[in-house]
Image: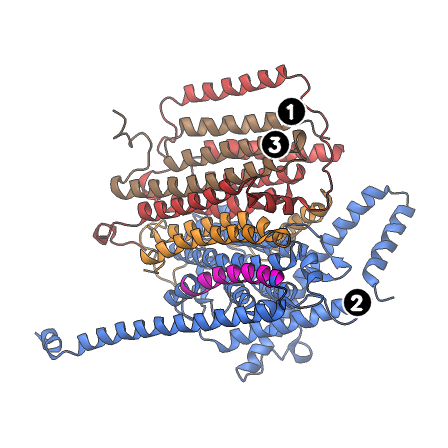
Chain colours: A red, B orange, C brown, D blue
Amino acid sequence: MTGLQIVFIAVGVITFAAAVMVVVSRNLVHAALWLILALAGVAVLFVILEAGFLAIVQVAVYIDAIAILIIVTVMLTRHAMRDDEPQLNKTWIWSALAAILLFGGLLFLFNQVPDLVAQAAPLVETDDTYLEILGKSLVDVDRFVIPFEVASVLLLAAMIGAIVVARPPSSSSQEGGQE
Amino acid sequence: MHEPWIFIAFLLPIGFILPAVTILFNRLLAPRRPNKIKDSTYECGIETVGETWVQLKGQYYIFGLIFLIFDIEAVFLFPWAVAYDKLQLYMVLEGVLFILILAGGLLYAWRRGALEWV
Amino acid sequence: MIPLTWYLILSAAVFCVGLFGVLARRNAVAILMGIELMLNAVNINLVAFWRYLSSEVISGQVFVIIVFAVAAAEAAVGLALIISIYRRKRTISADDINLMKW
Amino acid sequence: MGDPFSLIANWLLDLLVGFGLELEFTKVLLKFLGAGLMGTVAMLLMLFTIWLERKIVARIQDRLGPNRVGPYGIFQTVADLLKLLTKEVLVPSGADRFVFIIAPMLVVMSVVGLWAVVPFAPTLFGTDVNVGVLYLVSIGSIGTLGIMMAGLSSNNKFALLGAFRTVAMMLSYAVPMILALLVPTMLAGSMGLVDIVEAQSSMWFVVLAPVTTLIFFISSIAEVGRAPFDLLEADSEIVAGFHIEYSGLSFGMFFVAEFLHAFTISALTATLFFGGWQGPGAEAYPILGFIYFLIKTGLVYFVVIWFRGTFPRIRIDQLNTLNWKLLVPLGLAAVVFTAVIDKWAAEQDLSRVLMHLAGNALLVVLTLFALRAYARSARKKEEAIRSELMKPSHVSGAGD
């Protein structure tokens, strides 16, 4: 099992480093690419946690859709802020302190909890695969049908809202020279 | 449970390294005499005008957005489709309702003209 | 086997990095990226807890999927807002978007 | 005797374990070797399919095609490869070097990665992961990312615009593809491609869902960026799109990725809708299944080339309209129809095949009516504009 631990440490270090690069790179396109690396690292962690479906969903939703959307936005708004301007605000030192304090506090907390669960029980194999159970419980009246339908309404609202907000104003004169 | 993923964990890096090695070979074999004109931006022989970062139009955002929404929809619907055989009719209809609500969003985008290529 | 604590530490670290990004970056898009990092840290935690503490029930996975949906909606609307602000005010610096501050 | 694949694998396993290697480690090692073999075969296969494609397109267009290097010009691609190998790899000034260099590798990776889940024969497949279909969608879309990186890093505004247009098109056409993939998942009750092929033992899904097959086929051709959807890199009209600044084998990798992707979508169409390796005697003799798979893939690939040879390029607004106003609504309708009909037919104890065919026929008829209405309104609009232009006052007004 040590092989898995080595993989975990490698992926964890890459994910963390990529996350750090996201917040420190000056070039926003680079930040977005680092974000993609961090997200891919999280997907590998999901595979290690035997949640293959979630890993693929992580790739499909975050890397393929959200990251691309972020890059598109960066390109659309690129003229607003140059890379050589200061990228951090004046109180960044306090923010860094807050983040470090929070991390220290969380570490302290983990230390307080005695021996969470060292060993994960092997996944129980049933007649239905876990995807079937997942699919069934999503539309089961006794389980998650309300979140399921509410999620669709949420997505509908997000789609309509984003289209309304992001559509250029009908007088396209101020947008002249766009491609 | 990890087992099916080991092959993918090998194949993806290999798919990345094979072209890398090929390009590396190319770099080793090919001549390298860079000069300023050769390295300049290629625009069919015309001098480059203005900066590279041209303003893109917001339409690209709309397409990305609709793709994102349908991607998430797929995340909910694929488990539903996998469990399809074991669902009762009303459960199937709940999935259909889910699709129809999102189809409403598509219809809205259509009516607003957000799907036109301008 | 990997101890659960490792996941918790990694997730806490990523969360704090994301928090720093949200608090300290000036660019609104960078702030959104920080939020995505934080959401991902939360997801690591949710999946790890599902796997280690309650792998016999599916609720943990459903939780994560709902987080995905919320993250997608948040990114969609948040980025649309940024584009809209850029159109109207020609800025995406969070310092300058302060009309509602006072 | 008919199963050389597991025979070879078992023989290798026994051999390596005989050398004193640990069993678990040997299994992982074999997977690694398998992955390496698959990647290499995928890349080398291109030498053949590029030749094949050029030859067939040439015949369609009444030309000879490559005929100099080797018999029937079969080594033409090798010669092209050697030529590209001696071309200087340029990195334009002002380019984002690292991103620029890794972009083509990412594109190739996303295509080679697709092969992991394709079942070539009953006993020959990379891996049977239980989320195979979603894997296809998500790994295939990584290519989009590579294209975007290529455009962003080139420091060329035309590369940037080309990349963004390509990305917009690929994102758009991924939507009907996802919807089309829902149908085989539903019919097979599994996302694993091995299970999907096995579920087609009695009936191919193309019979149950012809409309979905067509949607999947069209949207995956668009995903590859093949003719008639190659307007974003139409080499005879605009420069090259996102790979304008690439030279040597860096460019060659985009080329390889495109051709490999075209072959891969043929294999996927054959797997998902045409029964994959299914055929008489395939269960007993896996080698026969592999041959069936190759024949089906070859036929679908021929249709892809045929499309390329015959259809004219479509315009960008037509591309957009075709996707959002035809394929996506049709895909949604097909999913709903399939879901309701299959359940209903099971409850009423009706013939599954007949009900599905009837549902698809209804869908086609409805689509045709919608298309007629759309064409009429479009014609009316055009006539209104034309009569507006033909008015005498307008003509004289222009002369003033």
Mark pair 1, 2: CA separation: 49 Å
Quarter occupied by residue B45: bottom left
Please rate how many residues cluster around mark 2, counting C-alpha atoms within 10 Å: few if below 14, some from 14 to 19, many from 20: many
Whether residue B23 is visible, yes or no, is yes
Please rate how many residues cluster around mark 3, counting C-alpha atoms within 10 Å: few if below 14, some from 14 to 19, many from 20: some
Query: Would you say A7 lies left or right of D152 here?
Result: right
Mark 1 and mark 3 residues within 8 Å of each other at the beta carbon = no
Tag 3: amino acid: Val
Front-lying residue, C45 or D226: C45
Kindly give the residue lying farthest to the bottom in the view shown.
D62
From this view, report whether residue A40 is shown above or below residue D76: above
Q: Which chain is indicated by disc 2?
A: D
Q: Position of residue A57 (x, y in %)?
A: 56, 45
Q: Position of residue C63 (x, y in %)?
A: 55, 36
- Magenta stretch secondary structure, dominant: helix
Mark 3 and mark 2 residues within 8 Å of each other at the beta carbon = no
Which residue corresponds to mark 3?
A13
State whether discs 1 and 3 lie on one chain.
no
Label disc, if present, on residue D287 of the rendered structure: 2
State whether discs 3 and 2 lie on one chain.
no
Mark pair 1, 3: CA separation: 15 Å
* The C terminus of chain C lies in quadrant: top left
Mark 1 vs mark 3, foreground winner is 1
Disc 2 element: helix
From this view, report whether residue B3 is shown above or below residue D261: above
